[in-house]
Amino acid sequence: MAVFDQDARSTHLLDYRLMAGSPVTLFWSQAILDEAIDWLTAHGYQVVRLDASGWLEEGDLHRDFASAFSFPAYYGRSLMALDDCLSDVAVCDYGVRPEATGLVLVLIGYDKFAACFPEVAEMVLDIIACSSWTAMLMGHRMFCLVQSDDPRIMFGPLGGAYARWNDREWREDRRGLRRPPVFGA
């Protein structure tokens, strides 16, 4: 069963656009993120928000993920255990409402966590991306929206694809950045 039908592709629905290039999409503007969340909620998505700006150590992230997705008591609070449990969420074993259109994980203030723990932050997004691919193989929708106050934040390939900026902020000037003048061009 396909996760989206031909109509979604031809009409460019927001959820399709958010998942088309990568299961992880970056947002700088809280207002644009809120619009996306409102649209997704109105279309039956289960939205889970986690505030990463307060994660002062890796244990904080594990505590919040375990709570948000009702991880089993045996959850090992490590990146390997996170990978295992999010794979279970991806196939709807727990942590997701089966009647939902899909699952959207929203990470707020992720740049603050990424500044302190850059390797862990990227690995977490990679785990989420891989779980998203697993969900799609099972006919489910699962993706992640990452809000950053740093308009230059970037991550390497996640689940085999780069995180990309949403289609309203992909140009740097839309994130408050000015391109330096190009001389001799």
Image: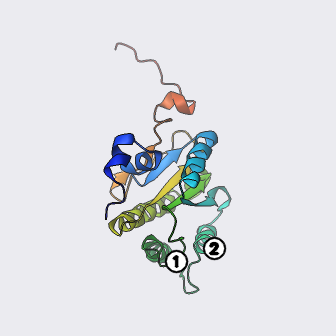
The amino acid pointed to by label 1 is Tyr
Q: Are marks 2 and 1 in contact (CB under 8 Å)?
A: no
Q: Quadrant of the N terminus?
A: bottom left
Name the residue at 58% across, 45% down.
33
* N-term-proximal mark, 2 vs 1: 2
Q: Secondary structure at mark 1?
A: loop
Provide the residue designation for mark 1.
Answer: 94
Q: Are there few (<14), some (14-19), or many (20+) residues within 10 Å of tag 2?
A: few
Q: Position of residue 53 (x, y in %)?
A: 65, 55
Can the viewer see residue 21 in this picture?
no
The percent coordinates of residue 103 (x first, y second) are 50, 62
Left of 185 or right of it: where is 169? right
Q: Is residue 177 left or right of residue 53?
A: left
Looking at the rendered image, the quarter that the C terminus falls into is: top left
**Which residue extends farthest front?**
7
In x, y percent, where is residue 155? 44, 50
* Residue 135 percent location from the top left of the image: 39, 67
Residue 74 figure quarter: bottom right
The image quarter in which residue 183 lies:
top left
Q: Is 10 placed above or below 71 here?
A: above
Q: Specify the farthest residue to the bottom.
A: 74
Circle 2 SS class? helix
Residue at the image position 58 percent from the left and 56 percent from the top: 107
Q: Which residue is mark 2?
A: 67
Q: Quadrant of residue 137?
A: bottom left
The residue at the point 57 percent across, 56 percent down is 106
Instruction: Using the image as rendered, state which of residue 140 and residue 44 is in the foreground.
Output: 44
